[in-house]
Image: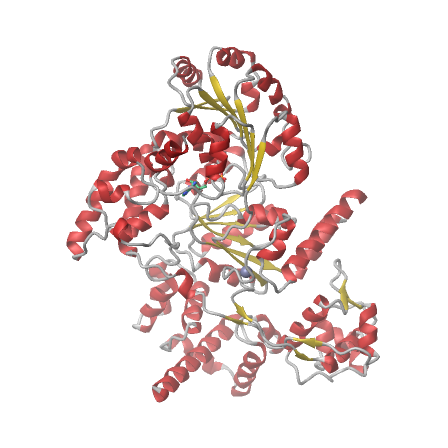
């Protein structure tokens, strides 16, 4: 039987191998043993019931809580040539009746139902005439009051089991807690059952957490890495969603908002537009994501804090379901924590305790410098397999050695103490560095003994130290106000009984390039994508239903020019190949002829490690900047690319940070209007604070030099550095 399952896997679904546990689960179901499957999103749950459904004589019923999920599954199965239908309230009477007829005529292998439809008398009598081989309960956590989406109708499903005692039952969920698992098994009266729990490690997700400083710029920089690719940006509030999506639209991005404040119709439209690749980016509150099965989501940006570790995991889980690399960036700020705390304080006392504990766990997760997967998986009761996953910021950061920092630590702690333990790090650092800021003078902190004693460390270094003192438990931060207090441990340090060591240099990033570079023909890939999109629009389905991205990438590696070669590729089964293959083969053949490339059959090349498209074609910032260097003016470029000057400056910034030299056209003359001394100060400020964040430089100059000018000067500095580097390397070569 399992041999047959393997054949179906390739012939219908187009996959060569089972994913972890799929084989075992299918075997178990085929032996008609009740089965509970716990697998993360993207793990490949659907195949676990779809393949048995194709092998059983009778009908497989799939209970699913969301109509959008049912529609998506049925559509995908239709494309694969599998007879699947659904019955739910969204169907017209005609369509409903048509589906019922097909069931009566035994033409259907999989029947998708909402639980309430299943429990209706007319459905039950329809099913009574059928040989029901398998009951599949998808999203089975809905059965449990301990899960996050309890659905009372799910509780009644057990009555059905009693009506169809011969049918095997398969329950699937991505919720891992033991309590929910127990609940599912007992509610469904599982006997002689087996549970399969897959790893929750999603290897293809690149995890990164950054301090939020210039959030808008950080967002643009991040988005720049994914031209024309789909992604979701999560925000905390509707207002934030509206603001950010408007901002991005103005910057020329293809973006739609999604939150509970929009009309149902608008929400549905925006979601559909995203699923069909008409909209590239969804800016959304947590309301978005359930019921979305889009496999090619290439990035998730947490613009705000998620509610807790579990929702963070769920949200990033929506990326990279197709197994290709996807990037998850979380912009973290202590200011946001204070905002959340404010919300928490509006809750009931009992809820406050839970929410605060969850928030603290989240902060703990963010601040650790071990592999991001370790605390994340631990949360789900799992140990990380490898010490270095190679797919998170911490693992890709060169660790700097810790040095003795007892003296600056004592200075910092004593400054906290002397200013009454009611201020945040920024103010303490201002005192230590002898700032004449209004706040320092107002509280007469320039009279403190610690005033101005910390000039030998930069502001950034002090911040860095203070973060580590928090992590080491020497300081305690008030979550509401951000103020710092000394812990009991801190006193040992102040008394000189305890030394402190910390890492003072900001960690260096190792290059991640080797891991993601991929030799596929990006021009061909783009043409294939266009072809897929137009076919999808004609058929009124999302593009991924025709072929997944990974198939198009493999086409752009192997150039198949006949059905045989196409059938070798990922995701190409016989039905799909016959139905949709020909136009692709034609396009590839023409392309290959024109460009003089030959087919490189997959079975001759041992390369099953297709990595995701990191970049398709040249990144935009490079295109724009090269045009600038070729003589185009700012005005030319903002018109041509329909971007604002600000975005243009960001592109140039990215370009010059990558070590390219820039041309300085008339637009830079503005810098000459600055008095020379101020220019010197700006350069010094960049030197002190680094190039990344402009705000510290802006503040150091008492807000007298505009951001625009600062950006221009920053470009000059970076470009000069790039030039120096080039000269250096010419000398050493
Ligand atoms: P889940 O329901 O667990 O979130 P899906 O069943 O939607 O996951 O599967 C996620 C993606 O992985 C889908 O695009 C699916 O086609 C693909 N997939 C499933 N099984 C395999 C396999 N054995 N080999 C390759 N891809 C697979
Ligand atoms: Zn890691």
For this view, does 41 lie left or right of residue 403? Answer: left
The x, y position of residue 75, in whole percent, is 39, 31
- The colour scheme used to paint the residues is secondary structure
Kindly identify the residue that appears in the image at 71 percent across and 57 percent down.
Answer: 338
Name the image quarter holding the N terminus: top left
Viewer-proximal residue, 237 or 171? 171
The x, y position of residue 104, in whole percent, is 41, 12
Q: In the picture shown, does residue 359 fall above or below 449?
A: above
Q: Is residue 266 visible?
A: no
Q: In the picture shown, does residue 683 fall above or below 372?
A: below
Q: In the picture shown, does residue 249 fall above or below 457?
A: above
The x, y position of residue 402, in whole percent, is 64, 76
Kindly identify the residue that appears in the image at 59 percent across and 70 percent down.
Answer: 695
Q: Residue furthest bottom?
A: 731
Viewer-proximal residue, 373 or 254? 373
Q: In the picture shown, does residue 1 fall above or below 207?
A: above
Which corner quadrant of the image does residue 404 belong to?
bottom right
Splitting the image into four quadrants, where does ligand 1 fall? Answer: top left
Viewer-proximal residue, 350 or 585? 585
For this view, does 172 lie left or right of residue 554? Answer: right
The x, y position of residue 215, in whole percent, is 56, 61
Which corner quadrant of the image does residue 19 belong to?
top left
Q: How many marks?
A: 0
Viewer-proximal residue, 350 or 56? 56
Q: Is residue 732 visible?
A: yes
Name the image quarter holding the C terminus: bottom left
For this view, does 99 lie left or right of residue 183? Answer: left
């Amino acid at each position: 039987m399992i041999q047959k399952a393997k054949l179906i896997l390739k012939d219908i679904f187009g996959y060569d191998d089972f994913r972890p546990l799929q084989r075992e689960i299918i075997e178990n179901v085929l032996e008609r043993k009740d089965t509970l499957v716990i697998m993360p999103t993207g793990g490949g749950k659907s195949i676990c019931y779809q393949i048995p459904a194709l092998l059983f004589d009778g009908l497989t019923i799939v209970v699913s809580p969301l109509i959008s999920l049912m529609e998506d599954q049925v559509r995908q199965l239709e494309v694969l040539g599998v007879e699947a239908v659904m019955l739910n309230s969204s169907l017209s009477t005609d369509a409903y009746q048509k589906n019922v007829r097909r069931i009566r005529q035994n033409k259907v292998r999989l029947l998708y139902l909402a639980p309430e439809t299943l429990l209706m008398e007319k459905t039950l009598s329809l099913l009574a005439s059928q040989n029901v081989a398998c009951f599949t309960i998808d999203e089975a956590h809905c059965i449990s009051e301990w899960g996050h989406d309890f659905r009372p109708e799910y509780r009644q499903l057990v009555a059905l089991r009693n009506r169809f005692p011969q049918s095997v039952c398969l329950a699937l969920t991505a919720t891992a807690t033991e309590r929910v698992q127990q609940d599912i098994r007992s509610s469904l009266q599982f006997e002689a059952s087996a549970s399969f729990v897959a790893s929750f490690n999603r290897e293809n997700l690149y995890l990164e957490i950054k301090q939020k400083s210039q959030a808008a710029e950080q967002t643009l920089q991040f988005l720049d890495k994914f031209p024309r690719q789909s992604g979701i940006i999560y925000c905390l509030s509707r207002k934030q969603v509206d603001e950010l999506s408007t901002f991005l639209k103005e910057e020329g991005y293809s973006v739609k908002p999604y939150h509970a404040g929009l009309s149902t119709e608008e929400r549905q439209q925006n979601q559909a537009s995203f699923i069909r690749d008409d909209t590239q980016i969804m800016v959304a509150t947590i309301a978005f994501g359930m019921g979305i099965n889009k496999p090619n989501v290439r990035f998730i940006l947490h613009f705000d804090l998620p509610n807790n570790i579990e929702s963070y995991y769920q949200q990033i889980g929506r990326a990279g379901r197709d197994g290709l690399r996807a990037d998850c960036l979380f912009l973290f700020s202590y200011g946001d924590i204070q905002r959340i705390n404010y919300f928490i304080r509006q809750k009931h006392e009992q809820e406050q305790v839970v929410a605060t504990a969850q928030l603290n766990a989240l902060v703990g997760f963010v601040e650790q410098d071990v592999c991001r997967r370790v605390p994340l998986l631990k949360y789900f009761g799992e140990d990380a397999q490898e010490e270095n996953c190679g797919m998170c910021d911490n693992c890709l950061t060169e660790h700097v050695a810790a040095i003795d920092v007892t003296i600056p630590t004592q200075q910092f702690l004593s400054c906290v103490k002397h200013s009454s333990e009611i201020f945040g790090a920024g103010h303490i650092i201002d005192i230590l560095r002898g700032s004449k800021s209004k706040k320092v003078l107002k509280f007469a902190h320039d009279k403190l003994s610690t005033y101005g004693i910390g000039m030998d460390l930069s502001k950034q270094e002090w911040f860095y130290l203070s973060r580590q003192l928090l992590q080491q438990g020497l300081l305690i931060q008030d979550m509401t106000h951000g103020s710092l207090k000394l812990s009991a441990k801190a006193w040992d340090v102040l008394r000189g009984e305890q030394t402190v060591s910390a890492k003072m240099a900001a960690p260096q990033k190792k290059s991640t390039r080797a891991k993601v570079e991929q030799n596929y023909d990006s021009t061909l890939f783009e043409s294939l994508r266009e072809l897929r999109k137009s076919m999808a629009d004609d058929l009124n389905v999302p593009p991924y239903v025709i072929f997944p991205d990974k198939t198009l990438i493999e086409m752009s590696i192997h150039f198949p020019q006949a059905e045989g070669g196409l059938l070798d590729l990922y995701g190409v089964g016989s039905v799909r190949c016959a139905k949709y293959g020909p136009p692709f083969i034609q396009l590839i053949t023409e392309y290959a002829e024109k460009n003089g490339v030959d087919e490189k059959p997959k079975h001759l090349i041992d390369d099953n490690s297709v990595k995701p498209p990191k970049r398709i074609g040249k990144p935009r910032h490079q295109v724009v900047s090269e045009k600038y260097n070729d003589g185009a003016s700012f005005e030319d470029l903002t018109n041509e690319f329909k971007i604002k000057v600000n975005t243009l400056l960001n592109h140039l910034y990215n370009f010059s940070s990558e070590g390219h030299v820039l041309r300085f056209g008339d637009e830079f003359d503005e810098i000459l209007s600055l008095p020379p001394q101020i220019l010197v100060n700006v350069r010094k400020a960049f030197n002190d604070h680094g190039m990344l964040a402009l705000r510290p430089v802006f503040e150091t100059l008492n807000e007298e030099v505009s951001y625009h000018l600062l950006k221009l000067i920053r470009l000059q500095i970076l470009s000069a550095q790039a030039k120096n580097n080039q000269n250096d390397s010419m000398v050493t070569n």
